[in-house]
Image (cartoon, helix red, strand yellow):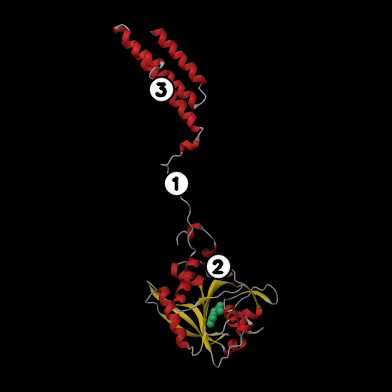
């Protein structure tokens, strides 16, 4: 019996050496552990062995069977690794994709558009590289006029500038469209400013223009007051303060009351006024028949107020730690 066990053991080790694939491994398992396998047969013979020798041979056989099972499963997993398609682990946690979110400026711009859309304003656009004519002259700001000093300008050539405000879109719209006109024009604008916490050489504005018969300063105040309430809440308080812009007459600044724990202050939110007759006449609109109002606000300023951002440069740094907060 001992000899037989030893010889099966040798054969097992020899055969294990030459097993090269899953099919050969399966055959080997049947040859040794199958119903008529070599090891199985030895277990059957155990009954014929003298009683006192049985425990010893039983132990040897158990060890042999264990060795065969271990070797087979070890080889099986090695073959398995070569076929990774069989080994997709569905229980592993997935890789989470990074989902983008809207930049705070985009969020505020979309909110502004939506508020004015509810009041009947559609969206107009214009180029960022603008002619001197649209950026200044058509807006009643002649060459060499001191009002040009209000906006430090980046010139591309004598006649081309990076637009300093979105007001030129007023002119482009009125050239194309007859009254009634009700548009807002969001977009990027440029000024020759050195960046600091409150200045950036580029920022964003929304222009507004309404031209029709019988438009008054009352319409302007009503529309902008509603805007402030929708943007900053029902309790928002605004005031209109006389100001000067070459393209409006009269002109005003709209201030928003900003409540703070210690008190509060009036913050300048936008410029506005009644469209200057020279501007209307310049685009061929009869200023005795039509009147209109216009306004312009900074999107960055509003976003900073709304979200409590203290440095405008954060809006342009593309720092994920900042952007992920919105
Ligand atoms: N364009 C002005 C600026 O950038 C803002 C402005 C003021 C726009 C009054 C207007 C307006 O349409 O009526 O400072």
Residue drawn 65% across and 80% down? 133
- How far apart in space, not on screen, are marks 3 and 2 (Cα)? 74 Å
Name the residue furthest bottom. Answer: 288
Residue at image coords 35%, 14%: 43
- Is label 1 or label 3 in front? 3
Q: Of all residues shown, which one is farthest toward the left?
A: 51
Query: Which comes sooner in the sequence, label 2 or label 1?
Result: 1
State how far apart marks 1 and 3 are (Cα). 35 Å
Query: Which image quarter: residue 262?
Result: bottom left
> Which residue does the image show at 44% across and 46% down from the upper left?
94
Q: Secondary structure at mark 2?
A: loop
Above or below for 155 versus 38: below
Disc 2/disc 1 C-alpha distance (Å): 43 Å
Ligand 1: quadrant of the figure: bottom right
- Asked whether 261 or 218 is in front, the reply is 218
Are there few (<14), some (14-19), or many (20+) residues within 10 Å of tag 2?
few
Closer to the eye: label 3 or 2: 3
Q: Quadrant of residue 178?
A: bottom right
* Image location of residue 58, percent across then percent down: 34, 13
Residue on which disc 3 sits: 69
Q: Residue furthest right?
A: 158
**In this view, 86 is above or below 62:** below
- Asked which secondary structure carries label 3, the reply is helix
Disc sitting over residue 196 in the figure: 2
Q: Quadrant of the C terminus?
A: bottom left
Is residue 310 visible in the rendered image? The answer is no
Horizontal placement of 253 versus 169: left or right?
Answer: left
Label 1 packing within 10 angstroms: few (<14), some (14-19), many (20+): few
Ranked by sequence position, the earlier of labels 1 and 3 is 3
Q: Which mark is residue 94?
A: 1
């Amino acid at each position: 019996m001992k000899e037989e066990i030893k010889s099966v053991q040798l054969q097992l080790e020899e055969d294990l050496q030459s097993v090269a694939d899953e099919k050969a491994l399966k055959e080997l398992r049947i040859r040794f552990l199958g119903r008529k396998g070599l090891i199985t047969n030895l277990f059957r013979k155990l009954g014929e062995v003298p009683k006192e020798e049985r425990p010893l041979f039983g132990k040897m056989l158990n060890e042999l069977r264990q060795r065969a099972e271990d070797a087979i499963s070890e080889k099986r997993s090695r073959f398995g690794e070569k076929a990774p398609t069989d080994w997709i682990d569905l229980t592993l946690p997935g890789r989470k994709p990074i989902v983008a979110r809207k930049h705070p400026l985009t969020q505020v711009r979309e909110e502004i558009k939506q508020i004015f859309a509810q009041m009947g304003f559609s969206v107009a656009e214009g180029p960022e590289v603008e002619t001197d004519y649209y950026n200044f002259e058509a807006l009643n700001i002649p060459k060499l006029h001191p009002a040009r000093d209000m906006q430090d300008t980046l010139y591309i050539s004598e006649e081309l500038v990076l637009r300093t405000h979105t007001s030129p879109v007023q002119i482009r719209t009125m050239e194309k469209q007859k009254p009634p006109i009700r548009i807002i024009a969001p977009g990027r604008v440029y000024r020759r400013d050195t960046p600091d916490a409150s200045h950036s050489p580029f920022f964003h504005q929304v222009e507004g223009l309404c031209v029709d018969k019988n438009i008054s300063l009352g319409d302007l105040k009503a529309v902008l007051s509603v805007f402030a309430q929708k943007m900053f809440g029902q309790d928002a308080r605004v005031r209109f303060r006389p100001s000067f812009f070459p393209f409006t007459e009269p002109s005003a600044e709209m201030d928003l009351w900003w409540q703070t724990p210690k008190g509060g202050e009036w913050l300048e939110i936008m410029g506005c006024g009644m469209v200057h007759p020279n501007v209307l006449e310049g685009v061929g609109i009869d200023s005795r028949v039509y009147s209109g109002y216009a306004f312009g606000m900074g999107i960055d300023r509003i976003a900073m107020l709304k979200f409590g951002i203290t440095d405008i440069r954060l809006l342009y740094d593309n720092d994920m730690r900042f952007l992920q907060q919105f």
